[in-house]
Image: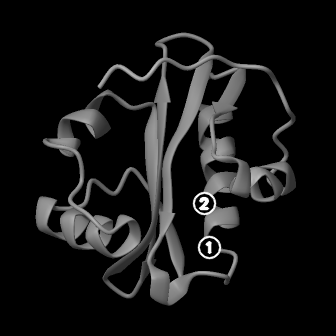
Amino acid sequence: MRIVVDPYPEAAVLDAFWRRAWGGAPPHNYAAVLQRSLTHLGAFVGARLVGFVNVAWDGGVHAFILDTAVDPDYRRQGIATRLVAAATEAARTRGADWLHVDFEPHLTGFYRECGFRHTEAGLIRLR
């Protein structure tokens, strides 16, 4: 397994991965999202995309982990942990001072093990 920084997977590759990992289609025109991101990383076994994480940013010092996912056939092998660690280093290298992540309660242990600490945050669902 290898991790690639900014792989820009073809739409069909990302679509197939997203459907396996998330159980549905990716957001419309996700390639445009990646073009505005600070970075994104893919985990590959051969040519197969098996893991993914996106790092959005505010254009300044804050970056945000989004869409961390691993193909169900490859879960529980440390791929997500390696992706988040590589994303953390890439964000640091590209000038971010802070790396944020929002997550559901069942992912608390995972993100704590990745080095994130608890903070209070707010959220408004817009759609």
Q: Residues within 10 Å of mark 1 (few under 14, many from 20)?
A: many
State left or right for residue 53 relative to residue 102: left
State left or right for residue 107 relative to residue 73: right
Identified by mark 2, the residue type is Leu
Nearer to me, 82 or 23? 23
Q: Which residue shows up at 85% across the image and 56% down it?
A: 113
Q: In the rendered image, which residue does mark 1 sit on?
A: 79
In the image, residue 8 sits, relative to residue 57, either above or below, namely: below
- Where residue 90 sits in the image (x, y, percent)? 60, 42
Q: Which residue shows up at 22% across the image and 73% down it?
A: 16
Nearer to me, 65 or 92? 65
Q: Looking at the rendering, which quadrant does residue 83 occupy?
A: bottom right
Q: Which residue shows up at 60% across the image and 47% down it?
A: 87
Tally the numbered discs: 2
- Where residue 45 sits in the image (x, y, percent)? 44, 85
State left or right for residue 49 relative to residue 81: left
- Where residue 77 sits in the image (x, y, percent)? 67, 83
Q: In the rendered image, which residue does mark 2 sit on?
A: 83
In the image, residue 69 sits, relative to residue 63, either above or below, namely: below
In this figure, which colouring scheme has been used for the structure? Answer: one colour
User: Any mark on residue 42, and which?
Assistant: none
Question: Which secondary structure lies at badge 1?
Answer: helix
In the image, residue 54 sits, relative to residue 47, either above or below, namely: above
